[in-house]
Amino acid sequence: MQIDVYEHGVFSWVDVTSTDLEKSRKFYSDMFGWEIPPGPEEFGGYSMASVNGRMVAGVSPSMDPSVPPLWSTYVDVASVDDTLEKVTANGGNVIVPAMDVGEAGRMAVFTDPDGAAIGLWQASDHKGAGLVNEAGTWGWSELMCDDPEKEKAFYSAVFGWGAVTNGEGAGAYTEWQVGGRSIGGMMQKPAEMPADFPSSWVVYIMVDDIEEGLKKLESLGGAVYRPPMEIEPGIFAVVADPVGAAFNLFQPKS
């Protein structure tokens, strides 16, 4: 699906931070067919990945050796500065203050009350991902946290999100909504996950065939953290790229 403009409060971009930029660029190019030319030096080599001429994700060099490789999600907002005021007023913490990114837009990163990091994007020249929900592109972002009820209150106050929850207890799944449309999800961290594993936002990348996708991923040096599991919308698996950034592969039901 092609998208040209995002509305306030909707996820609009994802990127992967890597401790080995060239290895990551090669992996995602080979894995999903992304075209990833080297990024400009003034932005540290931040590279924009595209499919058929439309941007799909970013590949960023790590600016802090203490931060492990990871995928990040960004929410489109009308004003980064106004949104950060809501973040701090409701118990969040700013970890990357508002800053202009050339003519592309304005950004910031914060952590929610449960400690999960998420980015803000105020678009200028760069509107966000131009192709989503197709094989080889980003399709969904999901919060895995300790306290879903606390997170519902926080994100409602910051972005005005609605929250529709199906199920009860630890197995409940919440869909975040903007204007009655589901844009992402949230669930409590599974019991089998280590207690010290931080709350985090997870990125899903779509594939036509998850078994073939996993074979290709492993042949390219990636790792499978959790084998395929069927859920109502389709089949997912938790994986990592060769540098160690975790993400999910997802095959939707036909």
Image (cartoon, grey):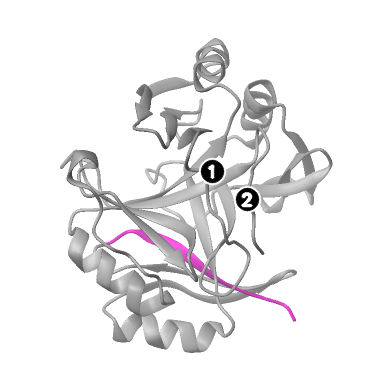
Q: Which of the two residues, 251 or 228, is positioned nearer the viewer here?
A: 251
| Disc 2 target residue | 4
Quick one: label 2, few (<14), some, or many (20+) residues within 10 Å? few
- Real-space Cα distance between discs 2 and 1? 7 Å
| Disc 1 target residue | 127
Q: Verify CB contact (< 8 Å) between mark 2 and mark 1.
A: yes
Image-quadrant location for residue 241: bottom left
Q: Which of the two residues, 181 or 81, is positioned nearer the viewer here?
A: 81
Image coords of residue 87 (percent x, y): 53, 19
**Which amino acid type is shown beneath numbered disc 1?**
Lys
User: Where 172 falls versus 180 (above or below)?
Assistant: below
Q: Is residue 174 visible?
A: no
Q: Identify the residue at image location x=57%, y=85%.
A: 209
The image quadrant where one finds the C terminus is: bottom right
Q: Identify the residue at image location x=56%, y=20%.
A: 83
The dominant secondary structure in magenta is: strand
User: Where 152 falls versus 144 (above or below)?
Assistant: above
User: Where 241 falls versus 105 (above or below)?
Assistant: below
Tell me the element at label 1.
loop
Magenta range = 244-254
Q: Is residue 49 visible?
A: yes
The image quadrant where one finds the N terminus is: bottom right
Image-quadrant location for residue 77: top right
Task: Indicate whether residue 31 is drawn in magenta.
Answer: no
Image coords of residue 192 (percent x, y): 48, 58
